[in-house]
Amino acid sequence: MNGKEFLKAVDNVVKEKGIDKEVVFEAMELALATAYKKNFDSLTNSKIVINRDTGDIKVYSYLTVVEDDFEDIDLDTEISLSEAQKIDKTLKVGDTVDTEVTPKDFGRVAASTAKQVIVQKLREAEKNSIMEEFGGKEDELLVGEVELEDVDNYFINLGRSNGILPKKECIPGEKIEMGKQIKVYVTKVDGSGRGMLILLSRRHYGFLKRLFELEIPELADGSVLLYSIARDAGSRSKVAVYSEKTNIDPVGACIGEKGSRIARIIEEIGGEKIDIVKYDPEPEVFIANALQPAKNLHVIITDPKKQECIVVADEDNFSLAIGKKGQNARLASKLTHYKIDVKNLEQAREMGINFLN
């Protein structure tokens, strides 16, 4: 392989792998240095220099310049300052004296020996490049194509790398079709193993959070703020929002005109019900809001430090506050970070709680 052919091969690798050309040159030099030492039994320090413009490959033996009184000079790797200055008077301690020692048949030997090392280094470089691209994508929303499926996972083509979407991280009941574009939430990016690991989810609460940010401009520009999310994927979610601007209705902004904004989000998550509630710094008000669609609730904070409360509901709202299989109260508890104990009027009286509802 002559210099021009070599440079062309490097350009092809750079284009195919999408990595920096200098990384390729450095990997090649390291691989060729290994090949030289292995095939020519070199005891001296040696280095490979590839001319970036011509593609010429040369091997140099070098001696490190040491002080004249340096004890135990290794003649294979070192040279005294006085001897070095006979070659070049400008040399000083720490410099090197280089001598070209390129063997005539080095190109053939190096090409056959270094191939696997080069491939390995290029894989590492590509992996690092992909890590740079995806390392900051954790907790972000990406769009990919469903490419493969096995018993436990879907494999999503994200461009330069594939992500793994475990089937248990899909929305219950949803159908994932091969070849279709799909939105996914990145839960983990790990480059510590042999390959890149990008774990994805569609049932994580963060997936819903990113969908809201994508569809609601006021969330993106900060005029509406998202306080918390509680999600029972495939069934129901609660989203608490607020605004520091008095002229903005945060709940209305998320719903959109005629429900257009929330409808797009609900469609993406397969019809999952979403309750959008207004966050309030007063826990009693926030808890009551979180227990919607129940109304006319009386909230009593029983332990502010442990964040525990009792909520009293009349007969018309008791079952609504608890929800089917306790779902409404459970989600409200996650949303507000309060332990919520829902009582009816009779239970409240038995506890000594009396008030006019």
Image (tube, rainbow, N blue to C red):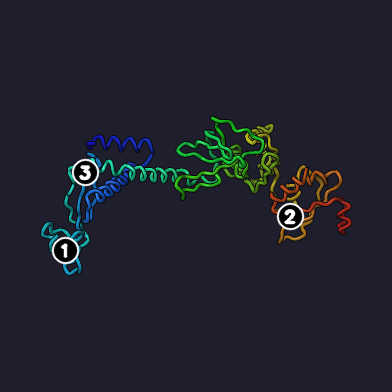
Residue 126 image point, x, y percent: 40, 43
Task: State if disc 1 and disc 2 touch (CB < 8 Å).
Answer: no
Q: Residues within 10 Å of mark 3 (few under 14, many from 20)?
A: some
**Upstream in sequence: badge 1 or badge 3:** 1
Q: Nearer the viewer, residue 311 or 179?
A: 179
Left or right for 54, reference 22:
left
**Upstream in sequence: badge 3 or badge 2:** 3
Name the residue beneath numbered marker 3: 106
Looking at the image, can residue 220 be seen? no
| Screen quadrant of the N terminus | top left
Q: Which mark is residue 339?
A: 2
Amino acid type of the residue that numbered disc 1 sits on in the rendered structure = Ser
Q: Residues within 10 Å of mark 1 (few under 14, many from 20)?
A: many
Left or right for 344, reference 226:
right
Amino acid type of the residue that numbered disc 2 sits on in the rendered structure = Lys
Left or right for 255, reference 189:
right
Task: State if disc 3 and disc 1 touch (CB < 8 Å).
Answer: no
Residue 275 image point, x, y percent: 71, 41
Name the residue beneath numbered marker 1: 80
Amino acid type of the residue that numbered disc 3 sits on in the rendered structure = Phe
How far separated are the C-alphas under marks 3 and 2?
A: 75 Å
Left or right for 141, reference 23:
right
Q: Residues within 10 Å of mark 2 (few under 14, many from 20)?
A: some
Q: Secondary structure at mark 3?
A: helix
